[in-house]
Amino acid sequence: MTRPARGTCVSADRTRRRAPRNRNARAAAKQAVPAARTGRRPTPPPHRETPVPSRVRRFRTGLSAAALTAAALGALLPPAQAAGAGEGAAGGHPDHDKRLQQRLERLVAQDDGPPGAIALLTRGGRTQVYTAGVGDIATGRRPDPDDHMRIASIAKAFSGAVALRLVDEKVLSLDDTIGERLPGQPAAWHAVTLRQLLQHTSGLPDYSGDPEFLAILQSDPRHLFDPRALLGFVADEPLLFRPGTLYEYSNSDNIAVALMAEAATGRRYEDLLKELVYRPLGLRQTSLPLGYRLPRPYLHGYDITPPAEPQDVSEAVSASGVWASGGIVSTPRELGAFMRAYGGPTLLSEKTREEQLTFRPGDSSEPAGPGTNAAGLAIYQYTTRCGVLYGHTGNFPGYTQLAATTPDGTRSLTFSINTQTNKSNKPALLARLRTVEEDFACALLKDR
C-alpha cells in the first residue's frame, strides 16, 4: 500500500520515543460517535473537554486511492474549458486576462494536474471568475463560484476568527492557558497559551500523525470520530519543544483553540461559528459537518495518480477527523467574503488585529502560499513580487485551496483545484500551482 499523502497540515516527520500510553484517553479518541450513520451528534457538552497528548508525524489526509476505497470512474478527463465570465467579465485588459486564463489551462493540462480549477478575483463589488477543466468528470460540468467544497486548513482561519472575536469580547485572552481553560488536558500542556496555539508555536504533538489515528482512517475512511476526543490520540506524548520557542504546524493546535472557546462560553463550537462568523458575514452556504456527505452542488475532488484513471474522493473521508482544524465546507464566493472580513479591518478591533498580524517571518502555511510566507495568528502574510496579501491555504483529499485578501479588505482572491497537492504529495504540481497563484495575486494587486 502506498504511504498516505499528507493532508490538511504537513511538516517534516519526526521519530520520537513513545511514552507509556494513556489508554483511557486513547480509548475515548478511537470510539466512534454513536448513531454515526444517522447524522445525530451525541457528543459531550462544550464545556467538557476530553483528557488529552501522543506523537508527531503529520496526518496525510490524502490517502491512497485504495485506502479511500473510492470507485474507479469510467470517464476520461475532458480537455480544459474556457473560463466562465461569472458576475464580472474579464474586461478592460483583455490581453492580461487572456494570459491568466492560459496559465490556468496549462495547470490543468499537465498529466498530474487537477481535473479542474477555479479562481475568483474580487475588487469592490465586482468579481471575475476564471475556470479551467471540469468540476465533475462524470458530467463535464465546469467549476462554479457557488459549488460547495472542502476548504481544508482554511478552517483554521475560522477558528482564529471565533477565538479573536471572543478576545475582543473579553471572554478569552490571548494569554489564557490550556491549564486555565482545559485543566483536564495533560499537565505538560498547561502552560501553552491561546496565542501560541493560533500561531503554531505551542509544541503540541499532532494527533493527525498518530499511527492509531491513521490506522482507523485507512481501515474506515468514513469513520465518525468524536471531534472533542481527537487530542486523546496524543495524550501520552511530550511537547515537541518549549512553547513559544519554535514553529510547528499542527492540527492539534486548532482543535485545542475550539475546545478553549467552548470552555470559555459553555457553547458548542459549531454554534459559535454561526453566531460570530457565519451570520455577521452573511455566510449561508458555509458549515462544519461531521460526516462525509457534501451539500449539493459541489466541486468534485479527485485522486490523480497517472496512469490510473481519476478517482472521485469528494465524499470518501469523514470531516470529523479534522473538525476545527480542517472540516469546514464553503464555496469560492463565500470563502472570499470571509477572508476579506477576517484579513481586513472590519471583523476585529484594531488592538486585536494588531496581535493577529504580528508575523513570524519564514513560517509558512501548509501547503505554502504564493511568495514568501510569514505566520500570524491563524493567518499568513504572503509577500509576492507585486505586494502583500493576508490569507490561508489548505489541502485535503481531492482539494487544494488558497484564500487571500489585500490588507484593507477590499479585494480578495480564492484559488481552488480539485486534487490534493502539498510538499510531499505531487510537489512539482505544488510548485506550478504557487507560480500561477502568484500571477493571480499580481492581477489582484494591480490597479485596474
Image: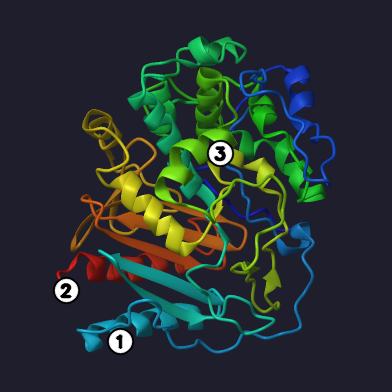
Marks 1 and 2, Cα distance to the nearest angstrom?
A: 15 Å
Say what amino acid the circle numbered 2 marks: Arg
On residue 448, the disc is 2
Seen from the viewer's position, the closer of residues 386 and 228 is: 228
Picture residue at 62% right of the left edge, 55% below the top: 5
In contact (CB < 8 Å): disc 1 and disc 3: no
Where 132 falls versus 207 (above or below)? below
Q: Looking at the image, which residue sits at the far left?
A: 447
Element type at marker 1?
Answer: helix
> Badge 1 is on which residue?
98
Residue shown at 40%/78% (left/top)?
86
Q: Count residues near mark 2 (Cα–Cα under 10 Å), then give few for <14, some for 14-19, many for 20+.
A: few
User: Which residue is identified by label 3?
Assistant: 324
Q: Quadrant where the C terminus lies?
A: bottom left
Classed neighbour count for the residue bearing mark 3: other residues with Cα under 10 Å, few (<14), some (14–19), many (≥20): many
The correct choice, above or below, for 232 with respect to 311 in the image is above
Q: Position of residue 11 (x, y in %)?
A: 49, 44
Q: Amino acid at mark 3?
A: Ala
> Closer to the camera: disc 2 or disc 3?
2
In space, the residues marked 1 and 3 are separated at their CA atoms by: 38 Å
Which circle's residue, 1 or 2, is located before the other in the chain?
Answer: 1
Q: Nearer the viewer, mark 1 or mark 2?
A: 2
SS for callout 3: helix
Q: Nearer the viewer, residue 273 or 280?
A: 280
In the rendered view of the protein, which quadrant contains the N terminus?
bottom right
In the displayed structure, 334 sits above or below 278; it is below
* Comes first in the chain, label 1 or label 3: 1
Q: Is residue 110 left or right of residue 359?
A: right
Q: Position of residue 50 (x, y in %)?
A: 67, 20
Q: Can residue 239 be seen in the rendering of this structure?
A: no
